[in-house]
Image (cartoon, coloured by chain):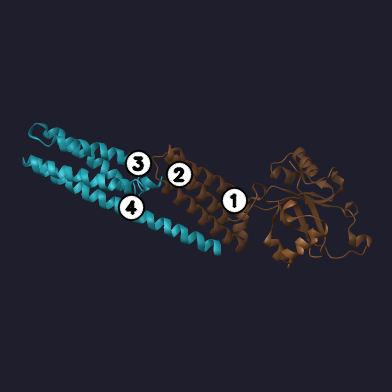
C-alpha cells in the first residue's frame, strides 16, 4: 500500500504538470491564432501596418512561450509553427497579399497541430 | 549532445525509482507480467533518449502510469486467485512418481530434453528418483525427490545441534558496519577488543563476520 501511495503521488504530480502544460499550450494556440486572424482581417481591409503589428505580436508570443511549451509539446510541431510564423510579418504589404494569406493559413494549420496533439480523440489514441 | 547526457541522467533516476517502487525481483524470478512491464519501461525510457524532439515528460508520465498499473494489478492479484491465474498462469506438474506427464509437457511447450536439462540444473540425474517436478509460473523447476532419495537431515540421524546462528559482516574493507553491530546487539568496543586479542587493528581487516554466539571469522587485508 505504501508503494501504491508513493506511485499515486508521483504520477499525480507528473499528471498535474502535464495538465498545466496542456493548458498552457492550448492558451498559446488561442492567443497566437487570434493575432493571426486579426492580421488576416487587417490585410483584407488594406491595413498593412496593422496586419504587420498583429503578425509580429503573434511571433513575439510564440517566441516567449516556445521554451516552456517545448517541455510538453513535440519539438517537431513547434519547429513547424516557428518557421511559418517567422515568414508572415515581412509579407504584410500591398504586393504580397496572397502569399501573406497563404502563409497565415499554414501557420494556423501548424498551430492546430499544437492544440490537437493534446485532445482526447480516437485519432490521437491510436 | 549535453542534452542527451542530462536526459539520460533524469531517465536513469526515473527508471531506478520505478523499478524500486515495483519491488525487488531477479529477472529469473519474474512473473510473465512483470517481465513485460520491465521490458516496456526500458523501451519507453529509450524513446526520449533516441528522439530528442520528444519531451522527456512523455516518457516519465508513461513510465509512472505503467508502475501504477503494475502495483494496482499486483494488489488485485494478491486478493483474487482468478486475476493471479490470468496474469501468471499456473504451475504444471511435469513428473509424478518418476513418470513424465507427456501431455502436460506438450501443454507447456517443453521438450523432454529441456526437462532433463532443468533436472540436471537441480542436481537430479535420474528421473526415477523424482517424486514431483513442478514447472513454476516464473519458469523455474521445483523438484521433490522420493523419500528414500532425499538426503538425511540432522533430525533424521538424531544428532544434537544448537540453534543455527547467522554470521553478519561486522567489518568490511577496514570499515566497521554499525548496522550489523546493532543487529547483533553489541557495540564497536566488543569488536575492537576481539581483534586486539589477536593483535589486529580494524583497519587491517578485509572481512570480519560475527554471530550472536560470539563466533567470528577474520580475513586480513593482503598487501596488494
1 vs 3, front mark: 3
Q: How far across and down, in percent of the image, does residue A86 sit?
A: 22, 37
Q: CA distance from mark 2 to mark 3?
A: 15 Å
State whether discs 4 and 2 lie on one chain: no
1 vs 4, front mark: 4
How many badges with numbers are in the image? 4
Q: In this figure, which residue is indicated by the disc labeled 3?
A: A75
Q: How far across and down, in percent of the image, does residue B179 sit?
A: 67, 62
Q: Identify the secondary structure beneath mark 4.
A: helix
Say which of A15 and B115 sits in front.
A15
Describe residue A120's horizontal placement relative to residue B149 as left or right.
left
4 vs 2, front mark: 2
The label number, if any, that marks residue A22 in the structure image: 4
Chain shown cyan: that is A
Q: CA distance from mark 1 to mark 2?
A: 25 Å
**Image quadrant occupied by the N terminus of chain B:** top left
Q: In this figure, which residue is indicated by the disc labeled 1?
A: B34
Q: Identify the secondary structure beneath mark 2.
A: helix
Describe residue B127's horizontal placement relative to residue A2 as left or right.
right
Outermost bottom residue: B185
Q: CA distance from mark 4 to mark 2?
A: 21 Å
Between disc 1 and disc 2, whose residue precedes? 2
Chain shown brown: that is B
Cβ–Cβ under 8 Å for marks 3 and 4: no
Describe residue A108's horizontal placement relative to residue A10 as left or right.
left
Q: Identify the secondary structure beneath mark 3.
A: helix
Q: Chain of mark 4?
A: A
Say which of B207 and B68 sits in front.
B207
Cβ–Cβ under 8 Å for marks 1 and 4: no
Q: Chain of mark 1?
A: B
1 vs 2, front mark: 2
Amino acid at each position: 500500500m505504501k508503494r501504491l501511495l508513493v506511485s499515486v503521488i508521483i504520477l499525480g504530480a507528473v499528471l498535474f504538470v502535464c495538465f498545466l502544460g496542456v493548458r498552457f499550450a492550448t492558451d498559446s494556440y488561442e492567443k497566437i491564432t487570434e493575432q493571426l486572424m486579426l492580421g488576416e482581417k487587417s490585410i483584407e481591409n488594406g491595413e498593412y501596418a496593422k496586419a504587420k503589428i498583429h503578425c509580429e505580436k503573434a511571433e513575439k508570443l510564440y517566441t516567449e512561450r516556445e521554451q516552456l511549451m517545448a517541455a510538453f509539446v513535440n519539438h517537431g510541431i513547434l519547429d513547424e509553427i516557428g518557421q511559418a510564423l517567422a515568414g508572415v510579418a515581412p509579407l504584410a504589404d500591398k504586393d504580397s497579399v496572397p502569399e501573406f494569406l497563404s502563409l497565415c493559413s499554414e501557420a494556423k494549420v501548424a498551430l492546430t497541430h499544437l492544440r490537437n496533439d493534446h485532445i482526447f480523440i480516437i485519432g490521437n489514441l491510436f | 549532445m549535453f542534452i542527451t547526457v542530462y536526459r539520460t541522467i533524469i531517465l536513469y533516476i526515473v527508471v531506478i525509482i520505478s523499478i524500486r517502487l515495483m519491488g525487488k525481483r531477479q529477472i529469473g524470478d519474474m512473473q510473465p507480467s512483470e517481465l513485460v512491464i520491465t521490458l516496456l519501461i526500458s523501451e519507453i525510457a529509450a524513446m526520449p533518449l533516441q528522439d530528442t524532439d520528444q519531451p522527456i515528460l512523455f516518457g516519465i508520465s508513461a513510465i509512472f502510469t505503467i508502475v501504477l498499473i503494475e502495483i494496482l494489478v499486483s494488489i488485485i492479484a494478491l486478493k483474487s486467485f482468478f486475476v493471479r491465474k490470468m496474469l501468471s498462469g499456473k504451475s504444471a506438474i511435469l513428473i509424478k512418481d518418476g513418470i513424465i506427464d507427456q501431455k502436460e509437457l506438450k501443454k507447456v511447450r517443453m521438450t523432454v530434453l529441456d526437462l532433463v536439462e532443468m533436472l540436471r540444473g537441480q542436481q537430479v540425474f535420474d528421473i526415477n528418483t523424482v517424486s514431483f517436478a513442478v514447472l513454476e509460473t516464473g519458469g523455474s523447476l521445483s523438484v521433490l525427490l522420493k523419500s528414500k532419495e532425499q538426503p538425511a537431515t540432522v533430525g533424521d540421524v538424531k544428532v544434537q545441534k544448537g540453534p543455527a546462528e547467522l554470521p553478519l559482516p561486522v567489518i568490511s574493507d577496514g570499515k566497521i558496519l554499525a548496522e550489523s553491530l546493532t543487529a547483533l546487539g553489541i557495540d564497536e568496543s566488543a569488536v575492537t577488543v576481539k581483534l586486539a586479542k589477536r593483535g589486529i587493528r580494524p583497519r587491517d581487516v578485509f572481512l570480519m563476520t560475527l554471530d550472536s554466539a560470539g563466533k567470528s571469522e577474520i580475513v586480513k587485508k593482503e598487501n596488494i
